[in-house]
Amino acid sequence: MSEPGKPLILVIDDEPQIRRLLRMTLLAHDYDIIDASTGEEGLLLAASRSPELIILDMNLPGMQGIEVLKKLREWYTRPVMILSVVNDEESIVEALDHGADDYLTKPFSVPELLARLRVCFRHTTPEEVEPIFKSGALTVDLSLRTVFVGDRQIHLTSTEYNLLKLFIRHAGKVLTHHFILHEVWGLGSIQDVQYLRVYIGHLRQKLELDPNRPQLIITEPGVGYRMQLLESKL
Amino acid sequence: MTEPDFRQRPNPDLLLKAIQRTEEKSDKGRLIVFLGMAAGVGKTFAMLNVAHELKARDIDVVVGLAETHGRKETEMLMEGLEVIPRRAVPYRNVALEEMDLDVILKRHPQVVLIDEAAHSNAPGSRHSKRWNDILEILDAGIDVYTTLNVQHLESLADTVHEITSVTVTETIPDLIIDMADEVILIDLAPEELIKRLKEGKVYSEERAGRAMQHFFRPGNLSALRELSLRLVADRVSRDIHDYQQVHHITDAWKTRHRLMVAVYASPYSETLIRWTRRMASGLDAEWFATYVESDRTLTEDENRLLRKNLSLVEELGGEVVTTVDDDPVRGLIRLARENRVTQLIVGKSRRGFFHNLRHGGSVVQRLLKESGNIDVYIVSGESSDQVSAPVGSINVSQKPVLFTDFIIAIAAPVLIGILGYLLNPIIAYHAVGLVFLLGVVILGLYISRGAVLLSALLCGLAWNFLFIPPFYTFAITAPEDYMMFGMFLAVAGIVGHLTARLRVNEKHLRIRERRMTALYHLTREISSAISMHDVLDTAIENIGTLLEADIAILVKQPSKVLLPHEGNTLILDEKEMSVAEWTALHSRSAGLFTDTLPSAKALYLPLVASHGTVGVMGLKPRRKRPDTPELTALAETFARQLAMGIEREQLNALARHTMLIEESERLYKTMLSSVSHELKTPLSAIEGSASALLDPVVARDDKSVHDLAEEIQAGSRRLSRIVRNLLDMTRLESGVLPVHKEPGDVRDLISTALRYLDKELSDHPLTLRIPDQIPLVSIDYLLIEQAVINIVHNAAVHTPPGTPVEITVSLEKEFLIINIRDNGPGLPPDNPEIVLEKFWRADPLKAGGSGLGLAIARGWIETHEGKLEARNHPEGGAEFIIRLPLEVHKNE
């Protein structure tokens, strides 16, 4: 059914209202969509239709969302976005650590959904690595290793720079504590989260216009951090 | 020790007893006794006849046990009645047959016939007497018809022995007559009975012949007949008495007598007890027995005898009061006065002349002298044959001879002799005598009386031999030395004896003191215990220490199950558990030292409080020891205290529970009224807007569509906030909330909280003051974030647009403070903290919240051992202060 040129999205959710809402919105925004109401059905569709992206609800009857995700990740390499309820941060983190690309909590707003989808697709489409990253007042030249807020140059320690680089590489995507710790410090233990908090604090002091109300590196409570992509003010 | 009170007129207790006698039977079975003067009068026959009558009236009657003795008429009567098969009890290679108690209880008929109430069960049965089986069946609510010959009654055993010179071995407490709802006398003229005997209707011919020569002599039978007639007549008059009390007839009331009988470890006491009981029933007086424990340690035989005597008292329906006193006379008089006794019954003294001399006269003489207005009855104790215990063992006086005492008694003179020898060159031999004397006095403080006297004698001899000239002979030359030697012996003897006695007295005082203190201590501890757990722990510790026993306390649960306390020092296996259960079920003590299941390892006492049995206390002495009345009495006293403590806690728990239910009902109602309104308002907005959107006319106007969609969005947000609050409240109240604390950044937390509130804060200028350096705080990020969201949300929506909101973070000692201040109308001035209560709302009619947000915030903060305060700022506006304990993390 899919028309050429339109990205195909698979929605796995047992609630008909959500499926209907997603179908309406996504079709209106030039995506193609197929849906499944159970995990098993979803896995079959994923294998037979190879969608560009999968939206997976964590609370499914029968096979649970996390199981579906694990099965998918055995062979499926494209983005998977998780739908979850609030107060279920543990399962969100678990899903992200098992290869989910991003998450949304129900009830979600449509503009937010579309923004997340765009970020996910941006990372899958191979693009040349931009040497200059801009977001809001922040400008980072990755080739020269310089960091500017407005026209003021900022000095970062190597750890801070590595942390910033990781955020830039995954700009717009949520990163779990575990992932960041592993990537920057090579640490595996979640007990070391306080290191991370301290460094995030430093980074915000140096990069944010108002460290008390950060705009660039924002906290996803209970899950991790996200680098916001802001309109460049320059 | 309870003190039955003395009274002149009917008092409520007595009336209650009388009423109970007539009404108590409602839940217990009725007891009907067929009483006869001897075997063969036709009791069983009469009982079976009644059974047939009952059966004809459709009453469920079974034969629990009937002895037909091979009599044909009786056997014929058994036909047509359901008979419970007997239980075989193997005993020394013989299979004895006994009544099957458990089957009867399980079968639970309306009426059960049980022949021969006085029968002793085969060893190994649950109860040693069939009479106890009957009690248990009555407790189960089954009516019992039983038979009894008059000579088996405990209080008549003596008289029967006197009349017939036959010793009755199977006796039964007189209680059976008191308890019986009806006593039916089966009377037969003696001549008639002898005729029946001759006809072989009672026993086989050979046995009948023997019986006629001994028991069934006309004279005997007439006497027995008179006994039984009198007994039934007495009962009738007692019934009238009961009636009088219940119906306020007090004219016939006479001055009450109170009889006290002194019981010793003596075979003669038995006669005394029976005498007292007879006299008491003749006078219609109360009676009780007393035992004065002295310093003498009783021998095994004596102990058995004493136990027998005391249990006889209880079987005859009397109470035992014990005390400790070295001087029996003093003890008796004290008890008599304490209990306002009018008549005191003692046996003739058989003490020797010296004993009397020492104690200032014979027991009887002293009693007469010191008893004042109490009548003293001296009863000669003619022993009955069956209780003649070995006299030798009973008359062993003083406490067991301690070998070490005598070693010391001999060693002391030797040592003092050596000392004297060393001192002799310096001091005169008279003074050496004083050294010896001092030694004797000191010994008196430590060793037994006999040993002191021996030592005194040895010291005298040593002094004489070594120091009084001529030396190294026992001869004395100077007359003053004679005098001094004689005086030494006298003084040493008297002083040694006095100090020894002083010590014993003091020891007894200490024992009494210790017991009183223990009881006082236990009572106080139990009354100050704050929980059931506390009460039980206290009891186990105190009672265990005092009685040197392992203690198990089992509390009866509402489901009737006995639950062992976890702090028990005595762990019960299945068998012991069943004894405990029996105790709880029947509210009677069982196990060790009792007649019921005496093979158990521990003594089980029911814990009886004012509303029934609340549990059972098991008590297992840590070392093997004989039962002493003191031990049992003390244990029972403790059990009463404990029972009251347990009941108190149970009532407390009940009150708390009721309060909790009332509280949650109130909350439920408030929640319904508050939340239903809150849920309905946004729902109707959503539904109205949605239906408007579906209207084709409205749908044409883009602006209307947009506004309606916004309306729906706002309604949904409100709904989801309420739902979230309700879920949070449920999580908070369920108390099972897991709090995942980890070091968190408060700056970060406030910023994410504010992100959720962009819309609400859009009309309020926000000031944030957060110091540059703030330590990480150990928190559950999401919970505290929610708390901050709820408080700031509250500040934003309850203040007029344009008023500023300020958030300030600061450190104060061990706390991190988050201060959230608005510039609105403020909180209720008389009680600002009320806004933190559940379902409290500024204006209940105005839509805008469930009244839960701040309560939840407080809940989350309190799960962090923090505090949320609400107050009015001096310059106006409300101020909320979150205090979170700082926990310093060193590995930053």
Image (tube, coloured by chain):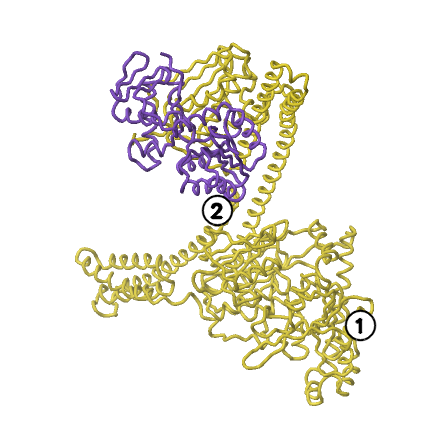
The answer, for residue B861, to whether it is visible in the render is no
User: Taking B761 as reference, is A46 above or below it?
Assistant: below
Question: Could you give the CA–CA distance between mark 2 and mark 1, rounded to whole angstroms?
Answer: 60 Å
Q: Which amino acid is tagged 2?
A: His
The answer, for residue B423, to whether it is visible in the render is yes
Q: Going by the image, does B628 lie left or right of B676?
A: left
Residue to which mark 2 is pinned: B521
Q: Colour of chain A?
A: purple
Q: Which amino acid is tagged 1?
A: His
Give the x, y percent position of residue B699: 64, 18
Residue to which mark 1 is pinned: B52
User: Taking A209 as reference, is B354 above or below it?
Assistant: below
Q: Going by the image, does B144 lie left or right of B503?
A: right
Front in this rendered view, residue A47 or B522: A47
Which of the image's four quarters has the C terminus of chain A?
top left
Element under disc 1? helix
